[in-house]
Amino acid sequence: MALKKFPGFIDVHVHLREPGATHKEDFATGSRAAVAGGFTFVIDMPNNPEPTVTLARLEEKVRLADAKAVCDIGFHYGTDGRNAATFAKAAAHPRVFGLKVYLNHTTGDLLIEDISALTEIFRRWPAGKPILVHAEGVQLAAAIALARLYRQRLHVCHISQAVEVELVRQAKARRQAITAGVCPHHLFLTGAARETHGSRAIMKPPLGTDRDQAALWEGLGDGTIDIVETDHAPHTKREKQADPPPYGVPGLETAVGLLFSAVHDGKLSESDVVRLLHDRPREIFAIPGQEATFVELDPQAPYRVGPPYASKCDWSPFEGWQAYGRPRRVRLRGKIVRG
Ligand code: NCD
Ligand code: ZN
Ligand code: ZN
């Protein structure tokens, strides 16, 4: 077995659920899932039951994370359309990496549907750190237009439809400051998985068609899509059995192994993986360097995805899949945090 050293991977899109939904995940279990998956820096989303839309809630998250996490954690600030007065301080906060805006219904209640509220958000967020959007289909066209009008850097979260890849490609061709992230579940699954996985294949944005999936791989190939982000969105097994089930799937522990399976299949190179999960996320979100931080794994060694998982939710939509390159040892600033 030939272990190779990779930089600590970065996931700019996770939901670690603390505070407010720690029966699903918390900063201890979520960060253990991160390092088990080879990530040493993750950025937590603001859609907690009490969303991260005030500076006090932001500071509370910083405190909770610092008390428990085994990897580095950053935060995206949230908006309910009424907190623009706090934007300047939030944007200047060293632990904040962007503003997250929800243009579609998903877990939590940060949805902004009103065009005036949306415009005000794009007008008031201080330029510099990106605005990240959950924006599906026509909502993405609106976000791209607003970002252009108000000269905001836009990051498109979990791009999933062929038409969205086309919109981002055209915006880039016109030199707009736009980047996009894709999730492993949209790359490796299609809506057909709802037959086999039931509610464990339900997330927002939903799994797409074969054509959407092909467009995502094409977008990775031609540089339209900049990064892979997991959108780690744990819910308990029991919650997923409810009708309707909550949206979301865990992803921190399987992303790296799935990407190395794409390397094995000749769809990506090892340096693509490092670019998608480290170099570009770091550039886009200006993430500080982590000294003496490495993941050791054998990218050619197959393994089977299965329990036990470090994530509190204890399941994966990829259970039973063959993946490659299970992280064997993770070092953060010289200290072994896994292995
Ligand atoms: C996310 C969650 O559960 O927090 N769910 C999901 O299906 N992706 C929210 C989100 O990212 O939209
Ligand atoms: Zn989302
Ligand atoms: Zn998300």
Image (cartoon, rainbow, N blue to C red):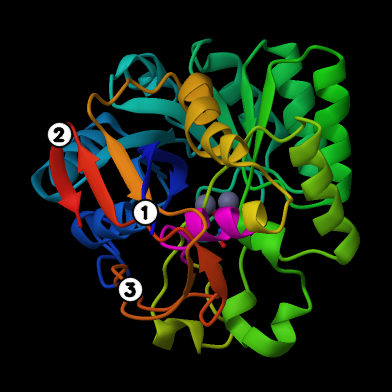
Q: Which residues are magenta?
A: 250-261
Q: Using the numbered discs, state the Cα–Cα distance from disc 1 to disc 3 in whole angstroms.
A: 23 Å
Which amino acid type is marked by label 2? Gly
Instruction: Single out the residue that lies furthest toward the front.
Output: 1
Q: Using the numbered discs, state the Cα–Cα distance from disc 1 to disc 2 in whole angstroms.
A: 32 Å
Q: Judging from the image, what secondary structure is the residue with disc 1 in?
A: loop
Q: Judging from the image, what secondary structure is the residue with disc 3 in?
A: loop
**For the point 31% across and 59% down, which residue is it?**
36
- Return the disc, 1 or 3, that comes first in the chain's sequence: 1
Q: Quadrant of residue 141?
A: top right
Where does the image place residue 95, in percent across and percent down from the top left? 29, 26
Label 2: which residue? 334
> In the image, is 337 to the left or to the right of 158?
left
Label 1: which residue? 48
Q: Which class describes the residues within 10 Å of circle 3: few (<14), some (14-19), or many (20+)?
A: some
**For the point 21% across and 41% down, which residue is it?**
331
**Which of 108/182 is in front?**
182
Which part of the image, by quadrant, shows the C terminus?
bottom left
Label 3: which residue? 309
**Which of 199/250 is in front?**
250
